[in-house]
């Protein structure tokens, strides 16, 4: 059995084993995208390239056999650069959005298309779960949010945007005033406490997520009631008091304690709160005018969105709410969630936050020629629906409106290897571009999957999957070279492939080229509904 | 209709069986039948055989040979190989498109009479540009003669009688008339010459033997006709025209009896009167091998794989034997053990001639070592290099030599099965090899008990379906297995796990053709030729802007200058020698100032090129370095199999950048971007195709960076790149109106006896006006 060196570690490989597998058994992970255990190596994506130390020769570790005496380096500047370029090349023929434009525009980053799909399908209980992943106060925002998402909605280029904000309000109020309000699963208590200064949108939001993560939360506010500037909206008449009270009450009912009439100033924080709490999260308005330098030096000067100070055993988190004059409640809500996440990461993994944006493939504005392609999954018979007099959708209206969504997002945005690697290597997705760029193609002819050829990296894992399944039709590569694409052979349609095969293909596809329409497979599939969206 | 398909497919299945690996032969047969692949027939094929839909569609869509829509009655193939490219093949192609009125995306004219296609290389580089209409090949085609060419083709019709026979029995032959019948010769009209020779012989009751000989290599002089008479030196005539034949023949052979003689001289005189010839055509065409140019062309050459060229009838097995053929095989089987043979090959230092130059004996040793019942030897004749035709010529002219090499390799490695993989684009080579295999079988060289030694071998031909990447050995193997020609990672090497998982020895046709000579003459003699690291000779297809192009075999270590100036006779029209493009799409562009570079594996690599398969295209000052780089890259980009990202996508972006530069839209940083991408493609590609694809671009940047910069500034110094040039007519115009008559876009108004002008808006830069102008008044400016 050959013995080789990988990253200075001596590794014994099995006969005929690839470098990648030999490394894997020695606990060394080599990045890969088109490689799957027990599949023939595709040797296509080139993420798994490694280098031989002496010769500098680049080897494709997924398919080159480990040989006696090899001296392999799996990470080097040159290799990293090569992987990055491979990603840039793959992205040059990758057309589509990771997150939909609406989600990117939403300061809180709500997964809007997924919520729309769930509303359309009448799965309101699941819809509120998705909403609350990012937004702690959806009913309130449903009334006062200026909805930047709707300005980004691609549907507005065809007729009118989807009424995202109203849909969110519908889902949230339906939940808040329904029989049983959704309570997210709480993690076990952590014996750690956080003092949150300011019980406005930011503080409430942070309290909601910290509480869920098992932290004991105490909200301190100079006012007698929680809500901060949100109360102004009640006064102005844009936000029904009932909604405000109910939503705040719902948060507080789950654990966070509210302390009214608290005098917010530096010495007070330092002397009274710091000794009692593990963390202090400052979620007050900027104009309160506390000079934080009083607490010492910032622990993460590199990171511009947050300062952290240290007083003995207490850490003070000061998220920098750079909203300027144009204050958006949704930004405050988003900031509260972000601050909670930073705090949790810091507490549990001892990591300081980094300003690293997650990678997003961004598609250009849709051309007239491709409107039809985008409308394939949408109900295209309606302009946006106006709600009834009380400004709230009925369930039927909501489902109809949600069905207008174009589903610009990628179904696999959260489990796409191309995106994952891009997050790591930070390629410039626009470095190489095709001119003219092709139009998006969506194959929506199958009730279970969406097939988007322009997201395919041509690795052939789906072909192998179908072959392993013994599928009578299977999938094939059509054409060759740059024009190669995955297709159903003999010009048959996707329906001629077995459901079970396609589900496996979607799971094995490293990108969103073949993706399940719905993440929830247990749900019985209504073929009729899928093939005719919006039809009742 | 459906029953028709069923009947035909059932018949094919009965012939070929139901195995998956028969897919490519099946598709070829179906296409032969319908001239494309009808969907119904393909469905039936899946139904009746083990072939799966996924395999079928994948393969049918991979190879360029296969058509998915019906073709016209006749097929026009415009060769866009390197030699044709530098001589204006794209302008010819565009002219055909205009003539046939093809709209964008269409390849067949409205009447369904002609289908127009581009073909990577027809292997007739010396008579470029070349166009093939069905079986008829036209050389030196010009874009202003398209209508004429099509009329000529349509006029040929059924008059072609290919089944004429000699009138005289063989024992009465007096003397020999040798006619070259390689593809170049045929393309330049040698079959018409043959017809005329036969006609002349019949009319005059003459009886010399007409002998077809393989490629002579002097492709620049085709068609060639050689007269051999007892006790006299042979006389060779070049560029023979049918009208010359009678005089040439009669000069050497006298008609028997008085009457025919009178008749002949009478006809001859009449002919001369009508043709208005003043001097004898025979004198004009006579090529004396003692003359300097011919001597130069031949003297620097050395013939090992092309031994006895121009003398051997390719399919005469007795003649091959008389010239020492099969002596090596006999020696191997009767006197040498496999180990001794491999020792000989090792001693000779033979390296693979397919491009990479891997030492042959190592492969032999590896295959021999494998203890398996089934082993393969494979002759790689999938010559896809768009500027090369060595393999074609060797297969056509020396089929027995290649078979002998293959047999020796099989014997030495213990392989019982041999396959010759030949491009379907080389029908003549396929036919000759087929016939040669038959002849060998009859004579006991192929079969179960060769030369009564107990050693047996089966040999068959596999026709490649048009994919350059199949020249790569693992892709070639995938192709024989009935799959898409996608390379596989090595190791395991084919020697261990090759065709159908069995140990396989894959050798290029030229490599194999060296084997008999080495065994017969001894490794020492072979090693004495060439340089230390590159022994023996190399065959090159010398083409481009050289006076004497052709198929040459030279000792390794010869310099580029010797090839271009001595063998090639220098540059046509006494233009300036600019560079040679050597090694085809994997090779590089070597500038004239490095003309002293020795042609061997080591030195070529040092200057950034490589031996490649043996294309050698000579460029002059009218060739644009950027355009040539773009040409080669567009070839490899088109031929990429699409498996790995660097080759599939990287070459596309390199090509995009080059296109931008050629269109005058380049930016200064584009050159750096090209170099960086090229470097990464070389590092990160899976197989040799991708790893070498950037070479032509890298060498041209290295040696001709100033030209890249000029393009970025909006100039094409060679005046080649259409977007950067303008045509104009100067005051020397005599007002003959020829240009206006021939201009395909009416960009020139007819102004008899006055200076003409070109409307720049309408001009498509097809170069026709410049070609037809009798007063050389058309200027190209950049």
Image: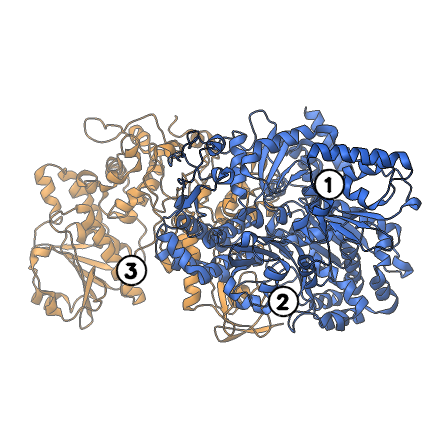
Decide which of B120, A209 is in the foreground and name it: B120
* Chain of the residue under the numbered disc 2 shown in the image: B
Q: Badge 2: few (under 14), some or many (20 or more) residues near its Cα, within 10 Å?
A: many
The span from disc 2 to disc 3 (Cα, nearest Å) is: 84 Å
Residue A498 in view in this figure: no
* Chain of the residue under the numbered disc 3 shown in the image: A
Location of residue A109 in the rendering, given as x and y in whole percent from the top left corner: 28, 48
The span from disc 1 to disc 2 (Cα, nearest Å) is: 37 Å
Chain appearing in blue on the rendered image: B
The span from disc 3 to disc 1 (Cα, nearest Å) is: 106 Å
Asked if B597 appears above or below B764 in the picture, the reply is: below
Decide which of B471, B156 is in the foreground and name it: B156
Dot 1: element = helix
Q: Which mark is residue A189?
A: 3
Asked if B459 appears above or below A163 in the picture, the reply is: below
- Residue A321 falls in image quadrant: bottom left
Residue on which disc 1 sits? B244
Chain appearing in orange on the rendered image: A
Do the residues under discs 2 and 3 have CB atoms within 8 angstroms? Answer: no
Q: Residue furthest front?
A: B278
Dot 2: element = loop
Residue on which disc 2 sits? B558
Location of residue A488 in the rendering, given as x and y in whole percent from the top left corner: 55, 38
């Amino acid at each position: 059995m050959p013995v080789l060196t990988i990253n200075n570690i001596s590794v014994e490989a099995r006969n005929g084993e690839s470098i990648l597998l030999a490394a894997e058994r020695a606990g060394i992970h080599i990045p890969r995208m088109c490689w799957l255990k027990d599949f023939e190596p595709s040797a296509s994506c080139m993420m798994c390239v490694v280098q031989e130390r002496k010769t500098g020769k680049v080897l494709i570790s997924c398919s080159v056999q480990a040989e006696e005496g090899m001296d392999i380096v799996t990470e080097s500047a040159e290799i990293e650069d090569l992987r990055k370029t491979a990603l840039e090349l793959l992205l040059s023929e990758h057309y589509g959005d990771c997150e939909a434009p609406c989600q990117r525009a939403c300061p809180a980053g709500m997964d809007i298309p997924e919520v729309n799909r769930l509303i359309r399908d009448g799965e309101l209980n699941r819809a509120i779960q998705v909403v609350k992943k990012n937004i702690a106060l959806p009913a309130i925002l449903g009334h006062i949010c200026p909805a930047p998402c709707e300005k980004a909605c691609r549907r507005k280029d065809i007729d009118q945007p989807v009424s995202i904000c109203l849909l969110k309000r519908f889902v949230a109020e339906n939940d808040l005033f329904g029989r049983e309000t959704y309570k997210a699963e709480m993690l076990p208590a952590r014996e750690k406490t956080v003092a949150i200064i300011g019980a406005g949108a930011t503080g409430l939001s942070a309290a909601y997520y910290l509480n869920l993560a098992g932290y004991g939360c105490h909200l301190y506010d100079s006012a007698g009631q929680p809500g901060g500037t949100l109360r102004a909206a009640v006064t102005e008449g844009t936000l029904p008091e009932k909604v405000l009270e109910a939503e705040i009450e719902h948060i507080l009912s789950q654990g966070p304690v509210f302390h009214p009439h608290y005098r917010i100033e530096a010495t007070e924080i330092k002397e009274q709160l710091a000794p009692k709490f593990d963390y202090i999260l400052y979620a007050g308005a900027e104009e309160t005018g506390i000079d934080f330098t009083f607490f010492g030096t910032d622990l993460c000067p590199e990171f511009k969105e947050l300062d952290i100070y240290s007083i003995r055993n207490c850490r003070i988190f000061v998220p920098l709410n750079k909203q300027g004059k144009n204050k958006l409640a949704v930004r405050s809500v988003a900031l509260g969630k972000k601050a909670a996440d930073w705090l949790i990461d810091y507490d549990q993994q001892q990591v300081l936050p980094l300003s690293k944006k997650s990678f997003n493939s961004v598609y250009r504005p849709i051309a007239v020629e491709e409107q039809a392609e985008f409308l394939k999954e949408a109900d295209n018979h309606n302009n946006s629906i106006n709600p009834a007099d009380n400004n709230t959708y009925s369930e039927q209206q909501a489902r109809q409106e949600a069905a207008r969504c174009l589903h610009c997002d990628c179904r696999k945005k959260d489990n796409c290897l191309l995106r994952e690697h891009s997050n790591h290597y930070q390629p410039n997705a626009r470095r190489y571009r095709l001119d003219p760029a092709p139009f998006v193609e969506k194959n929506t002819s199958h009730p279970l999957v969406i097939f988007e050829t322009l997201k395919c990296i041509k690795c052939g894992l789906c072909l192998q999957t179908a072959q392993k399944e013994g599928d009578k039709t299977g999938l094939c590569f059509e054409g060759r070279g740059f024009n190669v694409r995955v297709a159903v052979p003999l010009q048959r349609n996707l329906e001629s492939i077995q459901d079970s095969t396609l589900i496996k293909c979607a799971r094995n596809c490293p990108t969103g080229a073949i993706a399940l329409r719905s993440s929830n497979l247990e749900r019985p599939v209504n073929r009729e509904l899928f093939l005719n969206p919006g039809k009742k | 209709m459906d029953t028709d398909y069923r009947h035909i497919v059932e018949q094919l299945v009965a012939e070929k069986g139901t195995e998956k690996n028969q897919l490519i032969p099946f598709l070829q047969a179906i296409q032969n039948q319908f001239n494309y692949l009808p969907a119904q027939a393909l469905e039936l094929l899946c139904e009746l055989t083990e072939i799966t839909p996924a395999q079928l569609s994948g393969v049918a869509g991979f190879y360029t040979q296969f058509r998915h829509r019906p073709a016209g009655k006749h097929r026009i193939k415009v060769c866009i190989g390197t030699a044709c490219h530098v001589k204006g093949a794209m302008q010819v192609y565009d002219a055909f498109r205009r003539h046939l009125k093809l709209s964008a995306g269409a390849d067949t004219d409205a009447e369904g009479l002609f289908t127009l296609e581009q073909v990577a290389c027809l292997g007739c580089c010396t008579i470029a540009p070349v166009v093939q209409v069905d079986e008829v090949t036209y050389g030196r085609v010009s874009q202003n003669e398209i209508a004429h060419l099509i009329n000529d083709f349509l006029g040929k019709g059924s008059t072609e009688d290919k089944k004429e026979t000699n009138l005289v029995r063989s024992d009465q032959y007096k003397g020999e008339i040798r006619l070259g019948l390689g593809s170049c010769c045929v393309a330049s009209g040698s079959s018409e010459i043959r017809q005329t020779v036969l006609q002349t012989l019949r009319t005059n009751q003459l009886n010399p033997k007409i002998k077809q000989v393989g490629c002579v290599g002097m492709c620049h002089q085709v068609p060639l006709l050689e007269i051999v008479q007892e006790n006299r030196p042979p006389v060779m005539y070049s560029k023979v025209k049918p009208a010359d034949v009678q005089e040439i023949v009669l000069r050497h052979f006298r008609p028997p009896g008085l009457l025919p003689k009178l008749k002949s001289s009478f006809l001859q005189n009449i002919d001369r009167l009508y043709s208005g010839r003043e001097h004898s055509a025979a004198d004009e065409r006579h090529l004396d091998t003692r003359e300097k140019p011919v001597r130069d062309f031949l003297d620097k050459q050395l013939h090992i794989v092309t031994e006895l060229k121009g003398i051997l009838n390719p399919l005469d097995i007795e003649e091959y034997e008389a010239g020492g053929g099969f002596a090596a095989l006999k020696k191997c089987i009767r006197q040498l053990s496999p180990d001794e043979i491999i020792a000989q090959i090792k001693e000779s230092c033979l390296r693979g001639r397919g491009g990479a130059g891997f030492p042959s004996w190592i492969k032999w040793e590896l295959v021999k070592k494998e203890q398996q019942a089934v082993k393969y030897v494979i002759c790689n004749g999938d010559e896809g290099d768009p500027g090369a035709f060595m393999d074609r010529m060797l297969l056509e002219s020396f089929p027995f030599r290649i078979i002998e090499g293959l047999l020796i390799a099989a014997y030495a490695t213990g392989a019982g099965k041999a396959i010759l993989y030949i491009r379907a684009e080389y029908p003549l080579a396929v036919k000759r090899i087929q016939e040669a295999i038959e002849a060998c079988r009859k004579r006991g060289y192929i079969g179960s008990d060769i030369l009564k030694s107990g050693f047996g071998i089966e040999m068959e031909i596999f026709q490649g379906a048009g994919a350059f990447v199949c020249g790569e050995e693992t892709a070639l193997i995938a192709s024989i297995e009935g799959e898409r020609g996608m390379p596989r990672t090595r190791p395991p090497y084919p020697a261990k796990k090759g065709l159908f998982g069995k140990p396989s020895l894959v050798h290029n046709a030229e490599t194999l053709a060296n084997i008999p000579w080495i065994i017969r003459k001894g490794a020492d003699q072979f090693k004495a030729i060439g340089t230390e690291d590159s022994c023996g000779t190399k065959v090159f297809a010398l083409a481009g802007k050289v006076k004497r192009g052709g198929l040459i075999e030279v000792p390794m270590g010869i310099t580029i200058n010797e090839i271009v100036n001595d063998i090639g006779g220098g540059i046509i029209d006494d233009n300036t020698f600019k560079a040679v493009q050597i090694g085809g799409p994997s090779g590089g562009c070597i500038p004239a100032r490095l003309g002293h570079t020795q042609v061997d594996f080591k030195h070529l690599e040092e200057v950034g090129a490589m031996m490649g398969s043996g294309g050698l295209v000579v460029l002059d000052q009218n060739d644009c370095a950027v355009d040539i780089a773009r040409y080669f890259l567009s070839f490899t980009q088109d031929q990429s199999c699409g498996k790995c990202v660097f080759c599939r996508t990287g070459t596309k972006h390199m090509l995009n950048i080059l296109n931008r530069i050629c269109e005058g839209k380049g930016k200064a940083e584009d050159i750096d971007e090209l170099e960086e991408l090229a470097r990464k493609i070389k590092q990160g590609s899976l197989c040799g195709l991708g790893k070498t694809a950037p070479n032509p671009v890298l060498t041209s940047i290295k040696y001709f960076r100033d030209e890249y910069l000029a393009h970025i500034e909006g100039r094409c110094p060679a005046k080649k790149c259409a977007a950067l040039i303008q045509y104009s007519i100067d005051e020397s115009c005599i007002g003959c109106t020829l240009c206006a008559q021939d201009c395909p876009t009416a960009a020139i108004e007819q102004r008899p006896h006055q200076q003409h002008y070109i409307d720049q808006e309408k001009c498509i830069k097809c170069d026709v006006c410049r070609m037809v102008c009798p007063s050389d008044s058309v200027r190209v400016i950049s």
